[in-house]
Image (cartoon, rainbow, N blue to C red):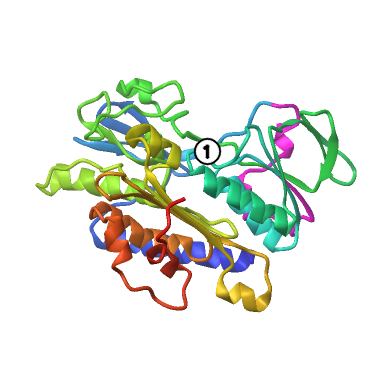
């Protein structure tokens, strides 16, 4: 696995590097920091060099955050997870976002005994509650131990593993403890203060709608501005910025109705607001929801269910949101995102002939409101 993973990363890095060099981009390898608003210092094994530019864009991303608890140095993050020398038998994952949920499924799929702790009442904050509870049920059925309203208080090294103390006072031993407790903008040591760049309380670079910082010639995109921490969003921001500054096509990034997926097992896909958000905005919205075992699972007798949900405006019939938990949810939601952007209505769904036998055909056959 490690060898194949390394080969794939090298392949992808090679593709991106060729795209840059073929476009005439000069790549400087080292650590960059601001000297002033027009000057950047690059430190590498060869020493230090300074470079000046009329326009500077910051896209340094984020870095995993590990809470300040005793023994925190014994834990790992997603950075180290792909470089483990051997498969851990007992895994504790702390967190309840994309990374925590996905790695719980990955380690479980490889045969590890997985425990996940999340400090609040329900994981995947910001997702529709039906999706959140449905995935919890599926993980329970698989044997992944999920504890809400729970956290880690301290870690201690033992001769056989890592002794982990939970907030309820109980102790458990694991081979690894992985912190998936959020990511912080990677601005420490960047020298933003030297350039006059304003940061918020989390360390994120503050930008306006045009992605301009507090300094007129400096821009920032991606996780370092802490708006929507998704790779495709960073790509969209970069494209908008390039078009605006150099392409003669000024435009702003559209953050509405962003389709996204959590690659859990089964995966989640969602586009549009949650039911709670829709009710707060539009009142008594129409809900269409179904849960079923897919045909391939009826043959294998696998106890896994798919959840599908549409939220519809009560007056305009416009589909406000599409939510799904099940096989290929990410693939389905990508196209649902296009439909939402185009202003699709429930009548459009109803008039579309389904593809049989697929799970996705359920989206065009749901007729009864919940």
Instruction: Give coordinates of residue 59: x percent, y percent.
Output: 36, 41
Compared to 194, does 130 lie above or below?
A: below
Residue found at the very far front of the displayed protein: 368
Residue 17 visible to an observer of this rendering: no
Residue density around tag 1, few if under 14, some if 14–19, many if 20 or more, within 10 Å:
few
Compared to 246, does 53 lie above or below?
A: above
Quarter of the rendering containing residue 185: top left
Circle 1 sits on which residue? 125
Quarter of the image containing the N terminus?
bottom right
Residue name at image x 26 percent, y 36 percent: 56
Which range of residues does the magenta coloring cover? 69-92
Residue name at image x 62 percent, y 73 percent: 297
Relative to 36, 95 lies left or right: right
Q: Nearer the viewer, residue 218 or 285?
A: 285
Compared to 334, does 147 lie above or below?
A: above
Residue name at image x 66 percent, y 26 percent: 68
Instruction: Give coordinates of residue 136: x percent, y percent.
Output: 64, 49
Relative to 45, 273 lies left or right: left
Relative to 133, 202 lies left or right: left
Residue name at image x 21 percent, y 36 percent: 55
Asked whether 267 falls inside the magenta stretch, the response is no
């Amino acid at each position: 696995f490690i060898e194949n993973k390394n080969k794939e990363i090298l392949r992808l890095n090679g593709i991106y590097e060729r795209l840059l060099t073929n476009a005439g981009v000069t790549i400087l390898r080292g650590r960059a920091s601001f000297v002033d608003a027009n000057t950047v210092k690059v430190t590498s094994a060869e020493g230090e060099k300074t470079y000046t530019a009329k326009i500077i864009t910051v896209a340094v991303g984020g870095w995993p955050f590990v809470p300040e608890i005793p023994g925190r140095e014994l834990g790992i993050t997603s950075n180290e997870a792909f470089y483990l020398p051997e498969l851990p038998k007992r895994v504790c994952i702390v967190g309840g976002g994309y990374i925590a949920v996905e790695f719980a499924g990955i380690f479980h799929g490889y045969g590890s005994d997985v425990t996940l702790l999340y400090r609040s009442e329900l994981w995947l904050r910001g997702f529709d509650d039906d999706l959140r509870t449905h995935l919890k049920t599926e993980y329970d059925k698989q044997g992944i131990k999920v504890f809400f309203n729970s956290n880690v208080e301290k870690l201690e090294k033992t001769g056989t593993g890592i002794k982990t103390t939970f907030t309820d006072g109980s102790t458990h031993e694991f081979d690894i403890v992985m912190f998936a407790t959020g990511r912080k903008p990677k601005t420490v040591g960047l020298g933003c203060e030297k350039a006059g760049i304003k940061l918020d309380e989390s360390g994120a670079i503050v930008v306006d709608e045009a992605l301009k910082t507090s300094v007129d010639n400096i821009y920032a995109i991606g996780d370092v501005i802490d708006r929507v921490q998704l790779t495709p969003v960073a790509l969209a921001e970069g494209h908008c910025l390039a078009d605006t500054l150099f392409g003669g096509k000024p435009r702003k990034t559209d953050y509405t109705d962003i389709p996204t997926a959590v690659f859990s097992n089964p995966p989640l896909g969602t586009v549009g607001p949650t039911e709670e958000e829709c009710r707060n905005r539009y009142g008594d919205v129409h809900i269409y929801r179904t849960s079923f075992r897919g045909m391939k699972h009826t043959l294998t007798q696998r106890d896994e269910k798919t959840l599908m949900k549409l939220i519809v405006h009560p007056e305009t019939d416009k589909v406000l949101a599409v939510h799904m938990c099940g096989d290929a949810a990410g693939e389905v939601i990508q196209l649902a995102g296009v439909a939402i952007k185009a202003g699709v209505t429930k009548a459009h769904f109803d008039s579309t002939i389904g593809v049989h036998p697929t799970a996705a055909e359920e989206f065009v056959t749901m007729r009864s409101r919940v």
